[in-house]
Image (cartoon, grey):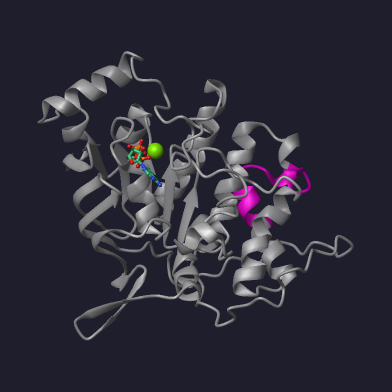
Amino acid sequence: MSPLSSLLRRSAPSDAEASQVASARTDPSAESPSAGSPSAEAPPRGGLVEIRGVHKSFGELEVLRGIDLAIAPGEVTAVLGPSGSGKSTLLRAINHLEPVSSGLISVDGEVIGYRRIGDRLHELREPEVLRQRTAIGMVFQSFNLFAHMTALENITEAPRRALGAPRREAEAHARELLALVGLSEKADAYPRQLSGGQQQRVAIARALALRPKVLLFDEPTSALDPELVEEVLAVIRSLARAGTTLVIVTHEISFARDVADTVVFMDQGRIVEQGPPAKVIDAPAHERTRTFLQRVRTGAAPASEDPAGSADPAADPAPGARTPPPTTPRTTPEDRS
Ligand SMILES: Nc1ncnc2c1ncn2[C@@H]1O[C@H](COP(=O)(O)OP(=O)(O)O)[C@@H](O)[C@H]1O
Ligand SMILES: [Mg+2]
């Protein structure tokens, strides 16, 4: 097994629902332990994601209109589609940041947001949703790092608070993750001291810190200067090879072709077509897919069609609103909605 594989291995879930470390800030005096030796146990397991008959409306506006999608463990799915087609809403539904109006989403058979009792579904209470969410990491377009924490602290925060991980252990893992994203020397840097590409790589490391079964990326390179895009894509490529289930909303068509097992093209709340890149990207069956790809390739569609950091609260979470990211079980009013 590769070191990367063992790094991402999902450990047995800790019972510690853990708040005793909520306010514990790290003690910088302690020597950082050397990286724990990767053990050669079970390979990393990506989760199986099943999305069935999912509809989502905001008031009168039906944003998801019957989504069916199965994502095999360890598979990489790239989601393409024009602005407003429901891509972000779908990602947010997967980790229950956006409760669906009807339909079901499950990860490894566990229904997200609900408990099945007999043939009825009961909505989970928040702590249970937060527990589920630790298995589903999310990386946003706008990084959303804690500005007042170093890279290392950003990464250790969730494992320590959510899982009650001992500091030394959390830091050792964080340093391994920083090495994984090529930022070993930036452990003590604050976000403002990092480039956009570096910040996004820290955000990826942070999402990995809870050893998620599924990692969701919402246009992870759209906010980056063009010369910084590749360093982030390279990290995502390495994850793709390591067996974590990845769902990536992106406008980087050649990247999608390169990395994805399945490409999904969405328009107006529906999946228009899905299949291997050789089919959907190179020989699309639908006119709408062809038109979209043409627009992206000719630059008619901007790299990011979403108004990053715009006033649209749905487009991207404002810092503070949904930060820390949904991998971290922090309570926000929005999460409760
Ligand atoms: N919380 C919300 N409240 C109202 N409308 C929303 C909300 N979130 C998203 N929308 C709307 O849903 C549609 C799909 O949005 P989104 O999923 O962000 O699309 P995409 O990511 O494909 O650009 C858009 O019309 C958007 O304005
Ligand atoms: Mg979006």
Q: At x 25% / y 23%, what residue is drawn?
A: 293
Q: At x 72% / y 45%, what residue is drawn?
A: 147
Q: Vertically, is 189 above or below 105?
A: above
User: Is residue 257 left or right of 179 when viewed as pictured?
Assistant: left
User: Is residue 141 left or right of 179 when viewed as pictured?
Assistant: left
Q: Position of residue 64 (x, y in %)?
A: 25, 47
Q: Vertically, is 148 above or below 6?
A: above
Front residue of this view, candidates 3 and 276: 276
Q: Quadrant of ligand 2?
A: top left
Q: Position of residue 191 (x, y in %)?
A: 71, 40
Front residue of this view, candidates 222 and 40: 222
Q: Position of residue 158 (x, y in %)?
A: 62, 63
Q: Position of residue 70 (x, y in %)?
A: 22, 57
Q: At x 49% / y 33%, what residue is drawn?
A: 221
Q: Furthest-front residue in view?
A: 60
Asked whether residue 182 is drawn in magenta, I would say yes
Front residue of this view, candidates 60 and 336: 60
The magenta stretch is 175-190
Q: Furthest-right residue in view?
A: 29
